[in-house]
Image: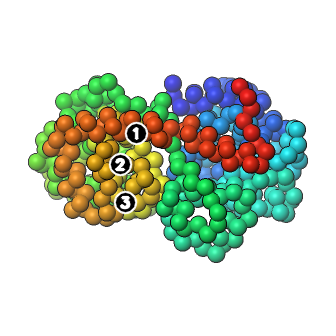
Amino acid sequence: MHPAGLAVTRFSNCVGFKAGRDHMPDGVDMTRVRLVVPNFKRRLSGVTSTIIQLVPFQTGLDVATLGPGLPDTLPKIRWWQVRALLRQPHGGGRRVWHARRNPEMLGGVVLRHVLRAPLALVFTSASQRKHTGWTKFLIRRMDAVIATSRKTAAYLEVPNTVVMHGIDTARFVPPTDKGEAAAAVGLNPAQRYVGCFGRIRHQKGTDLFVDTMIALLPKHPGWTALIAGRTTAEHVGFEKELRERIARAGLTDRIRFVGEHRDIENWYRALSLYIAPQRWEGFGLTPLEAMASGAPVVAADVGAFSELVVPGVTGEIVPAGDLAAMTVQAERYLGDPALVASQAEAAVDHVARHFPLEREARQLAEIYARFGVAERSA
């Protein structure tokens, strides 16, 4: 089932939907909402993706989202309903307002401290850099702070709890046959594929992936490289330069830009190796998605990657921005099918054991329970 359809199924009895056209939710019963997940950024981002994937696993908490940029398959508080946040939910007590960016923290602070809304404020930080004075001001007004990794926690100056992101292990699964998986997305089943997925830009290290493949593919004719993701207007020139670089190397047919896909899980299943070359990352879900789909990962030491990939077991970690190290490690896999196979199996098991979304949702529920917001019994 498509993730959107899955979300509808999971939410059908969540917080009192009023079904509108095509059975999309037309609002929620505000007396029942106990967990508010705001999203004030319209453009798709890692935070937005986290919300879209996680909220369907939080239905027992009577959850609802607020803001643009989220699909209507999620339970939504409409703007005209926001005033209901100034009143207690049915049964009394407080709601939890779970922010993941500064604007959402500010919204919670205004609601509680200016408008006197009965809210407990929770913030998740994925940043791995020194916080500004403004961010510190907002964080100090939170009732609970969550870090997405140990590295992130080190940048926080307040008590915090580490809750690492997970992924939907029912969506990202290994194929029974890589060739069939490749054919399913229109690729040559006789080739093996190495991928780099995400927004195409310098920060994401797309150029490092391209340069690695230019160095290696001529020596490994059985492999083709795939770059999947969106290029925003300000990075069109960056992509154009990469395409020209690939053309000069005579590899246009073997380093392919395949665009952005809603069914990205199908493209992951076609991969035998994944490269995560980012120069900077907050957390980064793509290594988990790749490993769950049966591909070992060579990842730069940014974000939470060193806490996701087990070196020598599910992939390798290389210094950020180190093209030579990335090329050396990638070549080990391109030249050793047995290594790929053994680590692919270990990667699937590793993610299933340690990073299912259910685990993240359960750990968050334990934090919400501190403020009287508990899961409904089944």
Q: Do we see residue 266 in this rendering?
A: no
What residue sits right under mark 2 in the picture? Answer: 310
Is the residue 265 above or below the residue 142 in the image? Answer: above
Q: Alpha carbon of mark 1 to alpha carbon of mark 2: how far?
A: 9 Å
Residue 334 drawn at (x, y percent): 18, 44
Q: Which amino acid does the dot numbered 3 rest on?
A: Asp
- The quadrant in which the C terminus is found is top right
Of mark 3 and mark 2, the one earlier in the sequence is 3
Task: Name the residue type under label 2.
Answer: Val
What's the CA distance linking mark 1 and mark 3? 19 Å
Residue drawn 60% across and 73% down?
A: 132
Question: In whole angstroms, how far apart are the C-alphas of marks 3 and 2?
Answer: 12 Å
Which label is found at residue 301?
A: 3
Q: Residue at x 85, y 42 (%)?
A: 89
Front disc: 1 or 3: 1
Disc 3 secondary structure class: loop
Q: Disc 1 vs disc 3: Cβ atoms closer than 8 Å?
A: no
- Label of residue 350 in the image: 1
Say few, some or many: other residues with alpha carbon within 10 Å of mark 3 (under 14 / 14 to 19 / 20 or more).
many
The answer to whether residue 147 shows anywhere in this view is: yes
The residue at the point 32 percent across, 34 percent down is 345
Task: Assess disc 1: are there few (<14), some (14-19) or many (≥20) residues with their C-alpha within 10 Å of its C-alpha.
Answer: many
Q: How many marks?
A: 3
Residue 111 image offset from top left, x and y in percent: 81, 58
Of label 1 and label 2, which has the lower sequence position? 2
Answer whether labels 3 and 2 touch (C-beta < 8 Å): no
Quadrant of the rendered image containing residue 19: top right
